[in-house]
Amino acid sequence: MAKTITIDPVTRIEGHAKITIHVDDKGEVEDARFHITQFRGFEKLSEGRPFAEMPSLMARICGICPVSHLVASAKACDDLLAVDIPQTGANLRAIMNLAQLVQSHALSFFHLSSPDLLMGMDAAPASRNILGVAEQNPQLALDGVRLRKFGQEIIATLGGKRIHPAWIVPGGVNAPLTEAHRTEILSGIPAALEMAQRAIDWYKSIADRYREEQTTFGNFPSLFMGMVSPDGGLDHYDGKLRIVDAAGNIIADQLDPKKYADYMAEATEDDTYLKSVYYKPIGYPEGSYRVGPLARLNVASYAGTPRADAEMRLFKKIQRGAVLSSFFYHYARLIEIMYGIERIEELLNDPDILSTHVRAHASPNRLEGIGMAEAPRGMLMHHYKIDENGIMEWANLIIATGHNNMAMNRSVLQVAKHFVDGNKLEEGMLNRVEAVIRTYDPCLSCSTHAAGKMPLHVRLVGPDGALLDEKRRD
């Protein structure tokens, strides 16, 4: 008999989701879907607020990646002001964004995914967590905690607190960096680089155990999209967009984020609150693509820092063309941790980093503004419209997890078809279905902000189970 297997909740991710796996009467998987079951709607909550409040308000979307929302929101506000912010202000924003990248990637790799990699996908669930990692490999667990601390302390040093700092503002930042704080941050760089290198070495030592997962965890041709510098280098703050295909060929380059509506669109589906973003020239759903660390390393020609460049060269040798398997998000995340630490050191050693000219002041000079930054999970876009008094009239947020939505669904189906036997279910099979979602490190609280109307089906059922009324909006 055909049946549906439900994994609810999906564990070791941020937010609330479930997976349904549909098997036929032979026990073979026919379909599988990833459903986001929460909705928050920050876009509507923004309406009626003064635009200058937006960065701090948007930071409240997420406690894991608030800085990325601060950056993207502030850049949208810069666009409303029609100002070029001081270079030192831009560099200080970039430092904080990279610090968040380090701490968020550390959370994903060490706390959420390393239990599977250290103990195996079939290990007992009771031990498959960060406490189990601490018991079996104390150094690995300690490095994960300390790398998170390294990133969080930079955020606190610059912004005054680890979560939801209000330091990034329209026009720049609200206070310069002091010599004492620069010295303090630089003092932690050597140890952080050592921990990052240890993690990379450990990952490479165990990766061969997971050849089957490498082959099946979201291993399919797709487009990849990410931000690059004018000459194609890795960039998380101020670049333009590049798209490559599965063979690694550049199909679009230096796309202006402010013209995203020309090449990017969103679709809604009736079984999830998460919208799907696609590349308009190809259309829906064929125009799906991936973003985040795997995509960024696939689209960038180089990293731009010594250790990260050395690892990136090895990464690009994994397969000819783009690296297609989502399993390698783990490796890409570690390379970006290394890059983030090295790039923070470079920016802190810039001769002008202690300049007190860190903010441009202006009144709104445009009624529409767009800002983009690379969040840990991928491209983050904020698009605002205001009235003549600077009051928010409309907002659209395109979140990294939405860019990856179609790829995550395709990955869930691929893993389920390969590993799940509906006649003889085992916990390790279902853990692998969850684990492929963890490779993307989705942030679901960030991503459920619908613009426009979504399909909706409401049913009113009485105590006896009888259907009393129902309403549907397509």
Image (tube, grey):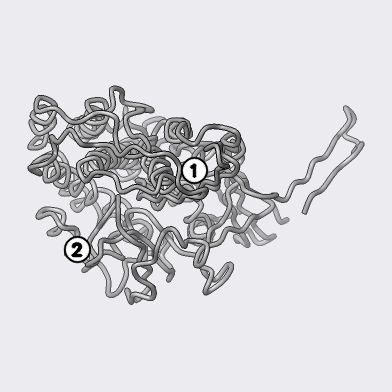
The amino acid marked with disc number 1 is Glu
Question: Quick one: label 1 or label 2, which is nearer the N terminus?
Answer: 2
Find residue 418 and report its horizontal and vertical position in percent: 49, 61
Which quadrant would the C terminus be assigned to in this image? Answer: bottom right
Q: Quadrant of residue 230?
A: bottom left
Q: Quadrant of residue 337?
A: top left
Estimate how packed mark 1 is, as few (under 14), some (14 to 19) or many (20 or more) residues with alpha carbons within 10 Å: few
Report which residue position mark 1 lands on. 427
The amino acid marked with disc number 2 is Tyr
At a point 17% along the width and 33% down the height, the residue shown is 356
- 25 left or right of 225 in image: right
User: Quick check: 366 above or below 40?
Assistant: below
Relative depth, front residue between 152 and 57: 57
Q: Which one is closest to the eye, mark 1 or mark 2?
A: 2
- 323 left or right of 8 in image: left
Relative depth, front residue between 452 and 272: 452
Report which residue position mark 2 lands on. 302
At a point 63% along the width and 62% down the height, the residue shown is 30
- 345 left or right of 17 in image: left
Spatial CA distance of label 1 from label 2 is 40 Å
Estimate how packed mark 2 is, as few (under 14), some (14 to 19) or many (20 or more) residues with alpha carbons within 10 Å: many
Q: Quadrant of residue 1?
A: bottom right
